[in-house]
Amino acid sequence: MPLLGCIADDFTGATDLASTLVRQGMRTVQVIGVPNGPLPEADAIVIALKSRTIPAREAIAQSLAACEALLAAGAKQFLFKYCSTFDSTDEGNIGPVAEALIKRLDAGFAVACPAFPTNGRTIFQGHLFVGSALLSESGMENHPLTPMRDANLIRVLGRQSEGSVGLIPFAVVEQGAAAIRREVTKLREAGRRFAIADAITDAHLMALGEACAGHALITGGSGIAMGLPENFRRAGLLPSREDAGALPEVGGFAAVLAGSCSRATLGQIGLARDQVPTLELDALATPDAAALARQAREWMAGKLEAGRPVVIAASAPTERVQALQAKLGRDAAGALVEDAMAEIAADLVAAGVRRLVVAGGETSGSVVQRLGVQSLRIGAEIDPGVPWTHARPDSAPEGMLLALKSGNFGARDFFLKAFR
């Protein structure tokens, strides 16, 4: 039986969470989409949904279905994972999904903490910072799907929720788990449904995790999971493991697919362009998924055999993304890139690629669905929050390695480091 059952609102975020759990000694499997059969054996199961930007009603339905599967498998505690930049709109989907899970699990209350200090996401007095900048001044205010223009998470979550939102402030978190538990009791008694938790260091996240040992539901980024495995060890439910991230060795060609338009991914493409074969597709000039896939197919011929990874990117600066959205509409523009990258991924695997990095949450979701990936065994990290994983997709039943990277994650040399 899984000890921890997790529901993630996108694919790369699910992998990020699973990687955190592996580092803390939990054997972890990521399941793609709501499962329709028995779940794999693991200490933790992360069900990866593509629910971040779909209508709230659909996101709730998918999340509750995932919750039912985890309940049936015997999970003892639940975590709803969303992005460390709290990606959402004023309508949701974080608040509506979290409230539905609170009701289903009869939890009454849930902590909300997207902090991930290793990657520069910290929370102070309820305000989310990306590095030294407020979320609303970090570039996320220009996100094409979920522009974040308010760094005050108490206000943001309050607009998405029917229940009221409180704060577990820095001064309390700094005192440790016992103080956090006392503050949670006060907030519950005051009728709060959620509490944003301040966190600036990993030590704060460990304290929050310890304090949440008895909570039916926890919500946040992958960092909030850091302290949870030790709770199960203290209870005698989880043995110490040194090989939680062991994966089979895999040969074959190597490639990168990038659909994210984040600053981090654009920088990673720029560095790779100078060192490995790189194709940059222009969706604005060629607004046709089949035509973009055909361009990539023609370009890759003969390049894979050279022994170096190849990079195929449909990423673009903000102004070109906005121009494409103005031309096609936001949803159609996103679908165009996702469909093209999914088809290119299938072509790459058919050509012998068995080590594939995918940059961007929506792109990753489309790729794994196109390849027929049903689950991922989580391995060691390349950079914080991005591990290699092992999968047996329909098109490569012998197995392949996949790294699903959130657009904002990874050092500038991430693509090259991954294959080293």
Image: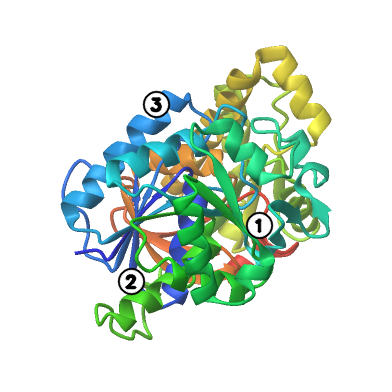
Q: Which residue is mark 3?
A: 58
| Residue 384 appears in the rendering | yes
Which of 54 and 249 lies nearest the eye of the viewer? 54
Which of 275 and 333 lies nearest the eye of the viewer? 333
* Amino acid type at mark 2: Arg
Give the residue displayed 49% in from the left and 31% down from the top. Answer: 162
Mark 1–mark 3 distance (CA, rounded to whole Å): 27 Å
* Amino acid type at mark 3: Glu
Mark 1–mark 2 distance (CA, rounded to whole Å): 23 Å
- Expressed as whole percent of the image width and height from the top left, the position of residue 49 reads 41, 41
The answer to which of marks 2 and 3 sits earlier in the sequence is 2
The answer to which of marks 1 and 2 sits earlier in the sequence is 2
- Expressed as whole percent of the image width and height from the top left, the position of residue 272 reads 74, 57
> Is the C-beta separation of discs 1 and 2 under 8 Å?
no
Horizontally, residue 415 falls left or right of residue 56, namely: right
Q: Secondary structure at mark 2?
A: loop
| Residue 285 appears in the rendering | no
Give the residue displayed 24% in from the left and 59% down from the top. Answer: 75
Q: Secondary structure at mark 3?
A: helix
> Is the C-beta separation of discs 1 and 3 under 8 Å?
no
The answer to which of marks 1 and 3 sits earlier in the sequence is 3
- Expressed as whole percent of the image width and height from the top left, the position of residue 221 reads 54, 56
- As displayed, is residue 45 above or below residue 246? above
Q: Quick one: quadrant of the N terminus?
A: bottom left
Q: Secondary structure at mark 1?
A: loop
Q: Which residue is mark 1?
A: 409
Q: Which residue is mark 2?
A: 27
Which of 315 and 291 lies nearest the eye of the viewer? 315
